[in-house]
Amino acid sequence: MKQKLMIISMAVAALLLSTESIQAQSRVVRRSRTEVRGDRNQNTDRRIRQEDPARSRRGTVVVAPTPAMRIVDNDVIRSFERERFDSNRLKMADMVFSTGGYMTVAQIVRVSEIFDFDSNRVKFLTSAYSNCVDRYNYYLVLATLDYSSSRDKVISYVMDHQKIRYAEGEPVRKMTSSDMNNIIRALKKEDFDSHRQKLAKMIVCGNLFTSRQIADMAKLFDYDSNRKEFLLYAYDNCIDPQNYLTAANTLDYSSNRTELMRKIGRR
């Protein structure tokens, strides 16, 4: 009798051990499946975020990339030529720029020449500046103006707004040899140092020049004092200030060179 009870007890114990083993294996399998599903969900979430960055779990707002500049067709430029009145031309320009249209300097020059009155040209040129593709060439639009007072208004507007863009981190352009050839020709056309000074500062503002390029512009001034004033202004836009003595040596008088270096050294 005792022997039968021992056999039954051993059978029950073996059955219990087998049941616990099966349950343990089941738990492992369930945990493994859960981990796989979790990894799969994480991968899915990661893929969704990569495909659509705006769908962030933290609700981060993603700024859309800046659209490419949309340059107007030449048909638009011809429509300005067909218009008879300056007032309507200004309204047309406002519509073009307010809808995200851009113009090249060549197109802006062409439109500006169509206007009948200098005052309206100034209004057009100041409104067109922000929507100009090649703003580094904007000094070329001054040739369309009849009066020096009109030129001064456009120059002041451009310099003020270019400084703001420059301060906000807008990319600036390093002048090429081709750019410099056009710049030198424009400066040579000026009859007086006072006009040359304003034009040179407008060109320098917001662009990058080498010491040699600045020196080439400075040589065009008739008077040493005007040359010194320009060199002091242009220094901040020089990409190789360690070579600025090249530009300073364009000054005729040692006193002006000394004053220039002293003022630059204080910056």
Image (cartoon, grey):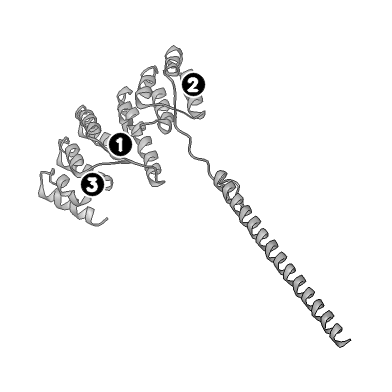
Q: CA distance from mark 1 to mark 3?
A: 14 Å
Write the residue at 56% across / 44% down: 51
Check disc 1 and report the residue beneath it.
Answer: 202
Secondary structure of the residue carrying numbered label 3: helix
Check disc 2 and report the residue beneath it.
Answer: 92
Write the residue at 35% across / 38% down: 159
As rendered, which of 258 and 99 lies closer to the eye? 99
Check disc 3 and report the residue beneath it.
Answer: 232
Marks 1 and 2: CB-CB under 8 Å?
A: no
As rendered, which of 146 and 215 lies closer to the eye? 215
Horizontal and vertical percent for residue 192?
Answer: 20, 31
Q: Amino acid at mark 3?
A: Leu
Seen as rendered, the residue at the extreme right is 1
Mark before the other along the chain sequence, 2 or 3:
2
Q: Amino acid at mark 1?
A: Met
Horizontal and vertical percent for residue 258?
Answer: 15, 53
Determine which quarter of the picture holds residue 210.
top left
Horizontal and vertical percent for residue 37?
Answer: 65, 55
Mark before the other along the chain sequence, 1 or 3:
1
Residue neighbourhood size for the residue with mark 1, other residues' Cα within 10 Å, grouped as few (<14), some (14–19), many (≥20): many
Horizontal and vertical percent for residue 225?
Answer: 17, 43
